[in-house]
Amino acid sequence: MSFEKNLLSQGQAFFTQDEFNKALNEAKGEIMAIAIQTTRQAIFIEREACAELLMQLADKEDEGEVCTALRDAATAVINRIPSQRQ
C-alpha cells in the first residue's frame, strides 16, 4: 500500500496551506498575548518589591525630608500602573 493510501485509510485530516497558516497565526497571537500579560505581571511584581524596599528604607530613617522622600517615591512606584492594582 502506498504512503498516501495508508494515510487516507487511517482517516488522517489534511489541511490546506491557507488553513494551516491561519491556525498558526492564531496560535502565535495567543502566545504573544500570554507573553505580554506575563511580562506586565512580572513588571508589576518587581515594582511592588521596589516600593516595599523603599518603605523599609523609609522606616529606618528618622522622620524628616529623607523619610518623606522615600515614602513619596514608594507611593509613586506603586501608583505607576494603577490598573494592575488588586
Image (cartoon, rainbow, N blue to C red):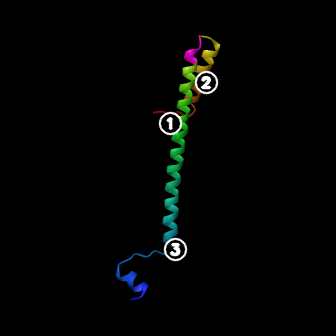
Callout 1: SS: helix
Q: Which mark is on residue 73?
A: 2
Q: Position of residue 19 (x, y in %)?
A: 48, 71
- Camera-side residue of 57 and 37: 57
N-terminal label among 2 and 1: 2
Residue 62 as seen in the image, left or right of residue 38 = right
Q: Does 12 lie within the magenta span? A: no
Callout 2: SS: helix
Q: Which mark is on residue 39?
A: none
Instruction: From this view, report whether residue 67 is shown above or below residue 29.
Output: above
Q: Position of residue 53 (x, y in %)?
A: 56, 25
Residue shown at the point (51%, 51%) measured from the top left: 33
Q: CA distance from mark 2 to mark 1?
A: 18 Å
Residue type at mark 1 is Gln
Residue shown at the point (43%, 84%) measured from the top left: 3
Residue shown at the point (59%, 14%) measured from the top left: 61
Residue type at mark 3 is Gln
The quadrant the C terminus occupies is top left
N-terminal label among 3 and 1: 3
Q: CA distance from mark 3 to mark 2?
A: 54 Å
Magenta range: 58-62
**Residue, disc 1:** 84
**How dense is the environment of label 3, judged by Cα within 10 Å: few (below 14), some, or many (20 and up)?**
few
**Residue, disc 3:** 17
N-terminal label among 3 and 2: 3
Q: Position of residue 6 (x, y in %)?
A: 38, 83
Q: Does 61 lie within the magenta span? A: yes
Residue type at mark 2 is Ala
